[in-house]
Amino acid sequence: MSQENVEIVRRGLDAFNRRDLDGFAAITTDDFVWLPALPGAVDRERFVGRAGIARYFSEISETWERLTAVCDDLRDLDHRVLALGRAIGRGSASGAAVETPLALLAEFRGNQITRLATFAGHSEALKAVGLEE
């Protein structure tokens, strides 16, 4: 099942980068919780369920002209998948180009993501799963 989870995270990254609400929601549970480290999430706001995904995508569109998550290092951790990569974007208001480390930890229930926590750094994410850099 874990390799399947890695593939589900890849599909989720693709759906996120396309802002495909239906595609992203299809791989999550109804009570899905998203804890983003980027746009509009200075205080680690929670986005819950399909409505939360839609709201988060909307906030991204307001804050970023373009924002893409690129994660090449996906690690199977049984019922979790850790993805390490970077966020690449351009701010809407400033026009400033941004490229910064990004990590995400997807937790699964069955074959769907139930919780997604994103981190602005690899070290923090590795620590969260008990791994070292």
Image: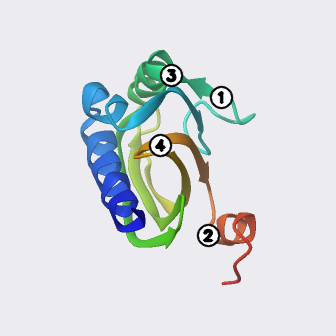
Q: Which mark is on residue 113? A: 4
Closer to the camera, 50 or 92? 50
Q: Which mark is on residue 46? A: 1
Secondary element at image label 3: helix
* Residue 12 in picture, x, y percent from top left: 34, 46
Residue denoted by label 2: 122
Number of marks present in the image shown: 4
Residue denoted by label 3: 49
Sequence order check: which comes first, mark 3 or mark 2? Answer: 3
* Residue 106 in picture, x, y percent from top left: 53, 52
Judged left or right of residue 120, residue 11 is left
Nearer to us of marks 2 and 1 is 1
Nearer to us of marks 3 and 2 is 3
Sequence order check: which comes first, mark 1 or mark 4? Answer: 1
For the residue marked with disc 2, what is the amino acid? Answer: His
For the residue marked with disc 3, what is the amino acid? Answer: Gly
Q: Residue at x 59, y 30 (%)?
A: 40
For the residue marked with disc 1, what is the amino acid? Answer: Arg
Q: Residues within 10 Å of mark 3 (few under 14, many from 20)?
A: some
Q: Residue at x 38, y 27 (%)?
A: 61
- Mark pair 2, 1: CA separation: 21 Å
Looking at the image, residue 32 lies above or below residue 49? below
